[in-house]
Amino acid sequence: MDDLSTIRSEALGAVQQAADLAALEVARVAALGKKGSVTGLMKTLGGLAPEQRKEFGARVNQLKGEIEAALEARKGALSASALSARLVNEKIDVSLPARPEGQGSLHPIGQVMDEVAAIFGEMGFSWADGPDIEDDWHNFTALNIPPDHPARQMQDTFYLPTRADGTPMVLRTHTSPVQARTMLDKNVQKMLADGGSLRIIVPGRTFRIDNDATHTPMFHQVEGLVIDRTTHMGHLKGCLVDFCRAFFEIDDLPLRFRPSYFPFTEPSAEVDIGCSWKDGELRIGAGDSWLEILGSGMVHPNVIANCGLDPAIYQGFAFGMGIDRIAMLKYGIPDLRSFFDSDLRWLRHYGFSALEWPSLTGGLGR
Ligand code: PHE
């Protein structure tokens, strides 16, 4: 029975020495697995005489029970120490500083759109939208720019493939097509017929083939449109003077209205704001120079008629302003192209807090 005691000491020794659960499983298989040492002893029982088989079988069974108990005990010990090792290694140091979370900021374009909307919102304007991809009719023809009009060349247009129904398509060259889209709206026409007054601003993207320090192929404009039965040039002037002074936050900002030409307004005026240059630096406010910031005028009767309204009844004014341009002027940003580079360092420098919503009472700029 030497065999039995050797197997016993080998099996129990392997169990005791198992350093982890994987080694313990190896020890279990070596003793009790299909080809294990104890299983091997069981297989010899069949060849023994009945007397011997009974006595030897009992001893082998006892050994099997002993090894199973040892495996169980070792498994418990190893699991407990594995857990305490994890508890030691995986402890969380609550005194460590928090992982830095980058705080986002608003792009100056979005900020300036919100500032513009805050000012015109106080004057009763609402925000209107239109598509970036426009048909030729809304972008030009409705606005009194017929197909062979030279003004089409003035606006370096991105032409798109013609629609299946033959409609020529463009990337809108200005926000003015939304004037037409809004006046054509049946609900707007009903509101006007009921004696109401239309006041919208249209901040949005516009596109022209152009690329230098002050022009990018995609840029932003805000359109303004007022239509009712009585609005006249004096209202246009008062509205834009108030807007420019509120926007630039300069109460006595000088403004100059210069006669100009747009096919969709008559009369038309370009608006300049006062400024001065000192040591190569631009200062907005009283000075001896002027900067052009927008185009405006009384909506041309042809445009009103093209949009299904009677120009003998309705009149009003419109204006269009470059958002990027007034953002550069107000916040002293030198190169327009940097607006669209997506450079995080630039955005950290020129960006705005998302938590401070611009308002006339709470403050517009930073
Ligand atoms: N749409 C004109 C432009 O892009 C600006 C403008 C709008 C002028 C409305 C007058 C009235 O240059």
Image (cartoon, grey):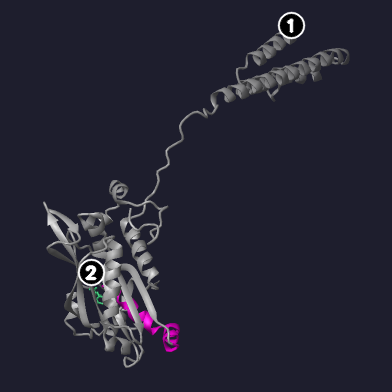
Q: Is residue 259 left or right of residue 107?
A: left
Where does the magenta region start and end?
171-194
In the rendered image, is residue 311 in sight? yes
Instruction: Please give the residue where the numbered disc 2 appears in the rendered image.
Output: 208
What element does badge 1 sit on? helix
Q: Residue furthest right?
A: 51
Q: Is residue 67 left or right of residue 191?
A: right
Q: Name the amino acid type tagged 1.
A: Asp
Q: In which quarter of the image is residue 356?
A: bottom left
Answer whether labels 1 and 2 touch (C-beta < 8 Å).
no
Q: Is residue 177 above or below residue 81?
A: below
Q: Is residue 287 above or below residue 233?
A: above
* Label 1 lies in ligand 1 vicinity (Cβ under 8 Å): no
| Disc with the residue nearer the chain's start (1 vs 2) | 1
What element does badge 2 sit on? loop
Q: Quadrant of residue 59?
A: top right
Q: Position of residue 43 (x, y in %)?
A: 76, 21
Q: Main secondary structure of the magenta part?
A: helix
207 or 311, nearer to the observer: 311
Q: Position of residue 164 (x, y in %)?
A: 34, 80
Say which residue appears at 69% left-offset and 21% top-offset. 76
Which label sits in the foreground, 1 or 2? Answer: 2
Q: Is residue 325 left or right of residue 22?
A: left
Q: Quadrant of residue 185?
A: bottom left
Question: Is 364 within the magenta?
Answer: no
Say which residue appears at 50% left-offset and 28% top-offset. 95
**Label placed on residue 2:** 1
In the rendered image, is residue 161 in sight? no
Tell me which image quadrant ligand 1 sits in: bottom left
Say which residue appears at 28% left-offset and 77% top-offset. 236
Question: Is 187 within the magenta?
Answer: yes
Q: Position of residue 247 (x, y in %)?
A: 30, 63
